[in-house]
Image (cartoon, rainbow, N blue to C red):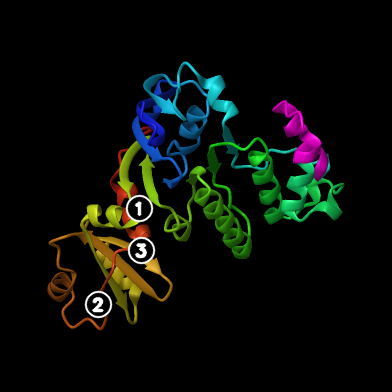
Amino acid sequence: MSEEFAIDVRGLTKRFAGRAVVDALDIRVRRGEICGFLGPNGSGKTTTIRMLCGLLDADAGEGSCLGHDIRREARRIKRRVGYMTQRFGLYEDLSIEENLDFVARAYGMSARRRVVDEALVQLGLQGRRRQLAGTLSGGWKQRLALATCMLHEPELLLLDEPTAGVDPKARRDFWQQIHSLAAQGLTVLVSTHYMDEAERCHRLAYISYGKLLAAGTAEEVIAHAGLHTWELRGEQLGAASTLLQSDARWMVVPFGSAVHVSAPRGEDLPAWLAERASGHAWRVTPIATGLEDVFIALTQHAQDNFA
């Protein structure tokens, strides 16, 4: 077991009804690192997170989380991990203070009154401590959920789509807080569908249908994908999209008033259009391939384990 990695697992597998929802997954996250965990809905992200923190037993695989064996020492892992679920998991009919106190009791914290008071100060909610959690806005619910995850001072934070449904300012504030915690040595594994959030992570791991398809920094993932991307602008872009979609080599995605087209390196979109649609009025400009282009391409070529 390496002390360099907070998460170091190999061959992690979980089956439901005979199907591998997580299929021989390898993932490593260095201590103090923010790792973005990406993939389409149903790709196995939540199942993976639950296995890492000991809430779900793996059917196969080995490795460690915070130096503890994920299959034999799940109880020890739970004490050192903060897990923020995809949906708000606190009691909406309890007050903010009561929720914090409940979690502090669950962890058996002897100085829980001091810990709860400090959390309220950090949240800026001292004056609203008796407000019911169910009446909070999405952004404040998110902040409360994160505060409860941090009460026992975990070494690893597992966040399952923590910013879904909150406004842009709340997302920005949340990520500033996550980077502040990582700078203090906390390790973070965060699942997200937002590409701007993925770019805020130190490293990325992308899975689809339970299999790891890409891992590395954002720059490494983009470079390894081996894609060329062009932007099409002009009139009748719908006709351009229909034409391009008749050939499987092109990945076509509308982007506002333009269309992005990606293909493996070596393909030549301007030459293809000149041959198939001579005299077309579309403006074709090479652009940098983005993470979203890469992830759409990865998902389109992944094998559906439920097909």
Query: Disc 1 marks which residue?
Result: 295
- Which region is colored magenta? 96-115
Sequence-wise, the earlier of marks 3 and 1 is 3
Sequence-wise, the earlier of marks 1 and 2 is 2
Indicate the position of residue 91 as horizontal and vertical percent values.
77, 37
Magenta region includes residue 113 = yes
- Where is residue 291, by image quadrant? bottom left
Give the residue displayed 14% in from the left and 76% down from the top.
274
User: What's the distance in space between the residues labelled 2 and 3, CA to CA?
Assistant: 14 Å
Magenta region includes residue 246 = no
Query: Disc 3 marks which residue?
Result: 253
Q: Amino acid at mark 3?
A: Val
The one of 155 and 284 positioned closer to us in this rendering: 155
- Left or right, 154 with reference to 144: left
* Helix, strand or loop: magenta stretch: helix
Question: What secondary structure is marked by label 2?
Answer: strand
Give the residue displayed 24% in from the left and 53% down from the top.
225
Task: Bin the neighbour count of mark 1 within 10 Å (Cα to Cα): few under 14, some 14-19, many 20 and up.
Answer: many
User: What's the distance in space between the residues labelled 3 and 1, CA to CA?
Assistant: 12 Å
Indicate the position of residue 63 as horizontal and vertical percent values.
38, 25
The one of 126 and 15 positioned closer to us in this rendering: 126
Sequence-wise, the earlier of marks 2 and 3 is 3
Task: Bin the neighbour count of mark 3 within 10 Å (Cα to Cα): few under 14, some 14-19, many 20 and up.
Answer: some
Q: Amino acid at mark 1?
A: Phe
Q: Amino acid at mark 2?
A: Val
Q: Is residue 277 above or below residue 35?
A: below
Give the residue displayed 15% in from the left and 69% down from the top.
272
